[in-house]
Image (tube, rainbow, N blue to C red):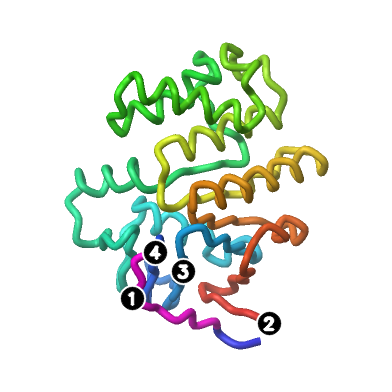
């Protein structure tokens, strides 16, 4: 095994650039010089044992954690140079999130959960109604628009979460164990959907998973160990 050094290029289609990123908590070095780039529409699986730094890397990419050294760029914007307000806007406009536990608002319908994400980016009412309706139909939930999360199966809830993550056409989707709460058949359907929508919208997908089978939809598989990215 050797340390993975992903070449950084000047390409207008880059969705994500992580360059020489380091992060420590107290005396513990969690990220030890991470280099990674992703193009629009590219899918990368990130694997590794618990404690290897995957969650910290995701938190740095979405701006929750501030890096100690290095740079992270989303759609060409360097997160470390942004004001708190501008950083929040980049996170709203350019990043989508899919979680293992769905994180849907329980009192909102499927339509309203997805629409809420569109409202956050200031999308007009006519556009968001059409976009939300079309996207929920695309993920197979055209007859579930008015259903609350409790009335949906696990797979259907994850489809709502995927629609919510993509409704504003982000540059990057961070998917953290998106099939972890699903059975194998439903999980496979969700993975196929993520692949299809990533292609359709040319959205970069960073998929964190412990399941090697889930990596079948990805263009690259990267393993993280002890705060570094490595490859076989």
Residue on which disc 3 sits: 30
Q: Is residue 57 above or below residue 228?
A: above
How far apart, in angstroms, are the residues tagged by discs 4 and 1? 9 Å
**Is residue 107 rendered to the left or right of residue 213?**
left
Q: For mark 2, give the secondary structure.
A: loop
Picture coordinates of residue 150, whole percent (x, y): 65, 16
Q: Name the foreground residue: 129 vs 157.
A: 129
Dot 4 or dot 3: first in sequence order is 4
Was residue 10 drawn as part of the magenta stretch in this picture? Answer: yes
Q: Nearer the viewer, mark 2 or mark 4?
A: 4
Residue 123 has which mark? none
Q: Residues within 10 Å of mark 2 (few under 14, many from 20)?
A: few
Q: Looking at the image, is mark 3 or mark 1 nearer the viewer? A: 1
Callout in the foreground (4, 3): 4
Residue pointed to by mark 2: 232
9 inside magenta stretch: yes
Disc 4 element? loop
Instruction: Provide residue 106's location: percent of width, then percent of height.
Output: 54, 18
**Mark linked to residue 10:** 1
> Residue, x 51% and y 19% (percent of image)?
111
| Front-most of residues 158 and 111 | 111
Q: Which residues are magenta?
A: 4-12
Label 3 crowd bin: few (<14), some (14–19), many (20+), radius 10 Å = many
Looking at the image, tell me whether mark 2 or mark 4 is earlier in sequence order: 4
Frontmost residue, 215 versus 34: 215
């Amino acid at each position: 095994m050797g340390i993975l050094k992903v070449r950084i290029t000047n390409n207008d289609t880059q969705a994500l650039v992580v360059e020489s990123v380091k992060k420590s908590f107290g005396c513990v070095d969690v990220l030890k010089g991470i280099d990674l780039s992703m193009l629009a529409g590219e899918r990368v699986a990130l694997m590794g044992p618990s404690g290897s730094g995957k969650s910290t890397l995701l938190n740095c990419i979405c701006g929750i954690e501030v890096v100690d050294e290095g740079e992270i760029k989303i759609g060409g914007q360097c997160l470390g140079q942004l004001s708190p307000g501008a950083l929040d806007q980049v996170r709203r406009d350019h990043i989508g999130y899919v979680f293992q536990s769905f994180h849907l608002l329980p009192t909102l319908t499927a339509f309203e959960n997805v629409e809420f994400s569109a409202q956050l980016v200031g999308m007009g009412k006519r556009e968001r109604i059409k976009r939300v309706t079309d996207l929920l139909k695309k993920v197979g939930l055209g007859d579930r628009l008015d259903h609350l999360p409790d009335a949906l199966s696990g797979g259907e809830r994850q489809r709502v979460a995927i629609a919510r993550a993509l409704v504003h056409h982000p540059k990057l989707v961070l998917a953290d164990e998106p099939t972890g709460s699903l059975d194998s058949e439903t999980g496979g359907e969700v993975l196929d959907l993520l692949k299809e929508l990533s292609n359709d919208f040319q959205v970069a997908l960073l998929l964190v998973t412990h399941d090697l089978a889930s990596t079948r939809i990805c263009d690259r598989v990267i393993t993280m160990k002890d705060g570094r990215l490595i490859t076989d």
